[in-house]
């Protein structure tokens, strides 16, 4: 088991990103930065490896794998930005927006996602849900999850 864990820790998810995701009416990158009191610091954030993205009714504050390779490092980076902004996060929720942290990446067999107890505690202190979004490189599950029905 220890050898299996060591192999998995050395083979993390690919294309990893960790994001604060906010969805709701009128949400975009500029409003997210303003609500979090980050001002017009989109350029400063991108130089630090954090980007903002948005579409109709959603925005993210995202730490990419080119800045921090592991999920633990990415979540710690996001926590550094958000831990002093609990009140603005609560305000976003009170305004009727859906707010969560999402960790996403390519999860193939034999890969692992490891978050330290310190990071997990920090995420819990934010008081917002944490979700995990995975895809496989092929875009399909390696096994048919309903195969047991044929038995």
Image (cartoon, rainbow, N blue to C red):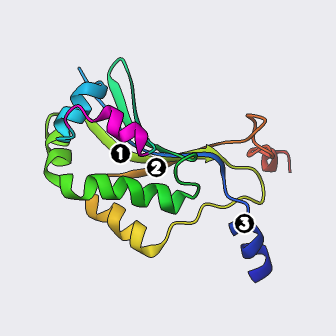
Write down the quadrant of residue 30 in the picture.
top left
Provide residue 4's location: percent of width, then percent of height.
Answer: 78, 74
Q: From the viewer's perspective, is residue 1 above or below residue 148?
A: below
In the image, 31 versus 135, the foreground residue is 31
Instruction: Tell me, yes or no, whether the highlighted magenta stretch contains residue 83.
Output: no
Q: CA distance from mark 1 to mark 3?
A: 28 Å
Q: From the viewer's perspective, is residue 113 above or below residue 59?
A: below
Are the residues flagged by discs 1 and 2 in contact, CB closer than 8 Å?
yes
Horizontally, residue 112 falls left or right of residue 79, namely: right
Residue drawn 32% across and 33% down? Answer: 42
User: Mark 3 = which residue?
Assistant: 10
Provide residue 84's location: percent of width, then percent of height.
Answer: 20, 57
Q: Please, what secondary structure does the residue beneath circle 1 have?
A: strand
User: Mark 2 = which residue?
Assistant: 131
Provide residue 110's location: percent of width, then percent of height.
Answer: 77, 60
Q: From the viewer's perspective, is residue 71 above or below residue 16?
A: below
Q: Which mark is residue 50?
A: none
Q: Earlier in the sequence, mark 3 or mark 2?
A: 3
- Closest to the camera, between mark 3 and mark 2, is 3
Are the residues flagged by discs 1 and 3 in contact, CB closer than 8 Å?
no
Residue drawn 79% across and 79% down? Answer: 3
Q: Earlier in the sequence, mark 1 or mark 3?
A: 3
Query: How would you classify the magenta stretch by its main secondary structure?
Result: helix
Q: Residues within 10 Å of mark 3 (few under 14, many from 20)?
A: few
Q: Earlier in the sequence, mark 1 or mark 2?
A: 1
The residue stretch that appears in magenta:
39-48
User: Mark 1 = which residue?
Assistant: 100
Q: Please, what secondary structure does the residue beneath circle 2 have?
A: strand
Q: Residues within 10 Å of mark 1 (few under 14, many from 20)?
A: many
């Amino acid at each position: 088991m220890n050898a299996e864990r060591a192999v998995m820790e050395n083979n993390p998810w690919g294309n990893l990103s960790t994001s604060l995701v906010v969805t709701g009416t009128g949400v975009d990158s500029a409003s997210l930065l303003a609500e979090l009191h980050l001002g017009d610091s989109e350029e400063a954030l991108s130089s630090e490896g954090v980007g903002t993205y948005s579409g109709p009714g959603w925005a993210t504050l995202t730490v990419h794998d080119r800045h921090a390779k592991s999920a633990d490092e990415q979540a710690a980076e996001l926590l550094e930005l958000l831990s002093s902004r609990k009140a603005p996060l609560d305000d976003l929720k009170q305004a009727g927006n859906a707010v969560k942290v999402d960790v996403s990446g390519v999860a193939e067999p034999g890969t692992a996602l490891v978050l330290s107890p310190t990071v997990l505690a920090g995420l819990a202190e934010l008081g917002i849900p944490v979700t995990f979004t995975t895809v496989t490189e092929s875009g399909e599950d390696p096994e048919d999850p309903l195969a047991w029905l044929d038995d």
